[in-house]
Amino acid sequence: MTPHLASGNHLSLIGHEAQHFLWQQQGSVGVITLNRPERKNPLTFASYAELRDLFRALSYVDEVKAIVIEGAGGNFCSGGDVHEIIGPLTSMSMPDLLAFTRMTGDLVKAMRACPQPILAAIDGVCAGAGAIMAMASDLRVGTARSKTAFLFTRVGLAGCDMGACAMLPRIVGQGRASDLLYSGRSLGGEEALSWGFLNRMVEPEQLLNETLKWAGDIAAGPNFGHAMTKRMLHQEWSMGVDEAIESEAQAQAICMMTKDFHRAYEAFVAKQKPVFQGD
């Protein structure tokens, strides 16, 4: 093992068993399955925290090159469980409420900070915090019957939850984001595709396989470069154009030092397809 990995910057999730959802590795693709289909896969205090911790850990996992999030039973995620989260929140103190909202926000931060591209496979209900997890993913594949709703206003809250007011306008535009966040209405699959919230739309029975195939294609690419792309996409939100161009110059120069860059050149010269290894 190289020194930088031996010094504590390397983890393996092979054989890892999640407690509050399913985790499996299919080759170089990690698959998270929200697995409470009888309730349309809602989140709990414990599952929020475990998802946050898993995405944090993935920053140190080399064998996982891309991540797919799906829901069991024909739905993606119905958001926070009404009985296990919403009810208890009504009797919490302000410090406890703030601890909770910061924890949910930390899940989004962890998703954006983990270097692997995240693909959400969205079918059926995708609501509340479920819609936020889809929004925080890098790519979204959906179905015509998917229904995405940022429901916070429906329960008397603001639409500005877990980064929605910062991220959603960058995906669908300010006016369309305002529509969704003020109304809490559902965004159907066809409309979500036309708005750019969904990157692709497939038949429900093809959803997981098509998403896994796309994730596999990404995982076979230059993973160091993909991680740099994700970092730049996130960091450049707050940069001016000149600053962004300089940051990308530095990022690209770093990528040119990787073996994958040399492999791509050597494969081109040999008229072969490069085999990237992420270093």
Image (tube, rainbow, N blue to C red):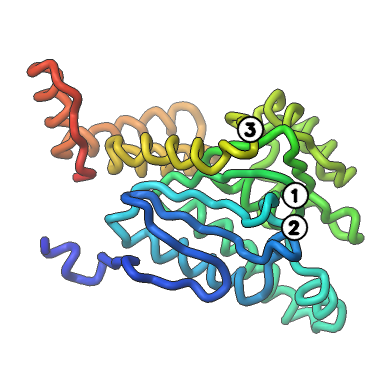
Mark 2 to mark 3: distance in Å? 21 Å
Query: Pointer 1: residues within 10 angstroms few (<14), some, or many (20+)?
Result: many
Q: Is residue 182 above or below residue 273?
A: below
> Image check: 254 left or right of 16?
left
Residue 173 found in image quarter: top right
Residue furthest to the front in view is: 205
Image coordinates of residue 190 in percent, x first then y, are: 74, 27
Proximity of marks 1 and 2: CB atoms separated by less than 8 Å: yes
Nearest to viewer (mark 1 / mark 3): 3
> Image check: 5 left or right of 23?
left
Residue at position x 70%, y 51% in the image: 75
Image coordinates of residue 81 in percent, x first then y, are: 76, 69
Residue 196 found in image quarter: top right
Image coordinates of residue 7 in percent, x first then y, are: 19, 70
Q: Quadrant of the C terminus?
A: top left
> Image check: 15 left or right of 68?
left
Q: Which residue is mark 3?
A: 203
Q: Nearer the viewer, residue 69 or 74?
A: 74
- The mark found on residue 100 in the picture is none
Q: Which comes before the other along the chain, label 2 or label 3?
A: 2
Q: Secondary structure at mark 2?
A: loop
Proximity of marks 2 and 3: CB atoms separated by less than 8 Å: no
The amino acid at mark 3 is Glu
The amino acid at mark 1 is Val
Q: Which residue is mark 1?
A: 125
